Amino acid sequence: MSPIVLFSFVVGYFVLLLTVAWYTSRGSNNESFFIGNKNSNWMLVAFGMIGTSLSGVTFVSVPGGVGSGNFFYFQIVLGYLLGYLVIAFVLMPLYYRMNLTSIYTYLENRFGVEAHKVGATFFIVSRAVGATARLYLVINILQLFILDKMGIPFIATALVILILILLYTFEGGVKTIIYTDTLQTTGMLLGLVVCTIVILKAINLDIFGAMNALQLKGYSRVFNTDVKSGSFFLKHIIGGMFIAIAMTGLDQEMMQKNISVKNLKDAQKNMMSFTAVLMVVNFLFLFLGGILYLYAAQANLPTDKPDDLFPTIALSDAFSGSIGVLFIIALISALFPSVDGAITSLTSCFCIDILNMNQSDASEKVKKSKRLKVHISFAILFFILVLIFKAINDKLIIDFILKFAGITYGPLLGLFAFGILTHRTLSGKWIWSVCLSAPLVALFIDMLSSPEWYEKKLHIELGLTKISEQIFHGYKIGNELILINGCLTFVGLLMISKKIASNKII
């Protein structure tokens, strides 16, 4: 299909988003921006969160990863289920009882100002890098398959997309995102289902025939029983559980939407509904990945670049554009919920947790002016980080995102766990030291376990292979990295803590 035709659909999609944003942001204020006036419909929040959780990375990297990782990714999804139960019935009651706008306010109430700043800072770093990695992946695909052919440079694409995201989140914030995420999740799921049906027809198989073919190829294996492997099922399930707790339950972006729901009961219904649908959708992505590899084998297509497999097939001449438009719409639908929400939540976090805007006596007008400046600043930061990712040009972004999350969300996991599970208080001056040291130690342990991963990703020679073999005997740390990091943080916090007189824990 002509790049100009595809580009026209992209433009039309943006116009629709801006129209929705204009309509939903009328009469908005700072409370609307931060928590949607606590009046969001739980069903809309649940549906929209699917798009936020999946993102363009899931849309491209999960299907692409089936070739080398089978359906092992679903082990992580099973871990998510356990994590979301903890969020719904442990963390969310805490957030609602304290009537929080920023979830990191809990850390201040429990441990003091320093803990609050540490939690907010780690979230800002984690979300900024993770969101821009996802953004880079989708922009790069649009660039390779559409915009390069039109002579539009990557830097211009990144700049225009961020300006458009800025425009439709500028006023309404969470109030607007609840509706735009719903629209975008619909586009993503429609694209997923239709693309799956078209590919099945292309390989002349129905669902059951495709599953049999995938089983014969070995692609449909869900559980990895090799205990030394980084994708061993217990590592993936346990790691997935704590990734969900950290990246959803301790993440301002995800919880900002949840606490915008009227009451705890509706928020819990939102979380469990979201969980059920998310599991089905992730399995569909894996199934799609499997049949993409079956199609590639029939058509003699290269599969050495997993992230390029889906777009290469969807936008090929073989389908005469039948799924090309849907793929592009679904891809950008998967992109925007994870980026618009990130910029909005980072703005909220910086204003509330770093600038203490909620405690300011300034007028609504002054606060709004400051908020808008912060919002623009984060958009500029995103632009810079996307260009950095372009320079690095990592080929499998999902590996990087999970690894980076394991390093940066660990201190948040340790801090919240220490607050909820113990009756001790902390010495403020040492919190930063512990929360910076624990990720560095966890990173070094991971480097010892998998030196080849770092050599490949960072293009350096670590010379740790012999040490790794002597210590780990082939054992590879997987997604349990976040748990190791959280435990190191917890132990460090225990060392700088002391008992408190009261047994009451916030």
Image: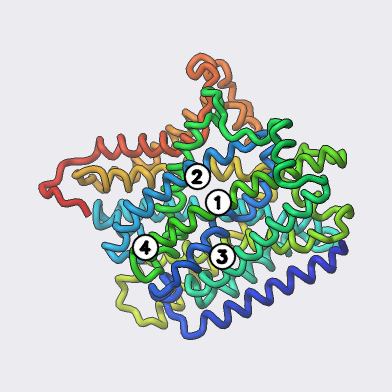
- Helix, strand or loop for disc 3: helix
Q: Position of residue 30 (x, y in %)?
A: 42, 76
Residue 496 occupies quadrant: top left
In what quadrant of the picture does the N terminus appear? bottom right
**Residue at mark 2:** 405
Q: Position of residue 130 (x, y in %)?
A: 55, 51
**Residue at mark 4:** 102
Q: Image height check: is 336 above or below 370?
A: above
Name the amino acid type tagged 1: Gly
Q: Residues within 10 Å of mark 3 (few under 14, many from 20)?
A: many
Residues tagged 1 and 3 counted as in contact (Cβ below 8 A) = no
Name the amino acid type tagged 4: Ser
Whichever of callouts 4 and 2 sits on the residue coming sooner in the sequence is 4
Name the amino acid type tagged 2: Ala
The residue under the point 21% across, 46% down is 425
Q: Image height check: is 82 above or below 184?
A: above
Whichever of callouts 1 and 2 sits on the residue coming sooner in the sequence is 1
**Residue at mark 1:** 130
Whichever of callouts 1 and 3 sits on the residue coming sooner in the sequence is 1
Whichever of callouts 1 and 4 sits on the residue coming sooner in the sequence is 4
Q: Residues within 10 Å of mark 4 (few under 14, many from 20)?
A: many
Residues tagged 4 and 2 counted as in contact (Cβ below 8 A) = no
Q: CA distance from mark 3 to mark 4?
A: 18 Å
**Residue at mark 3:** 340
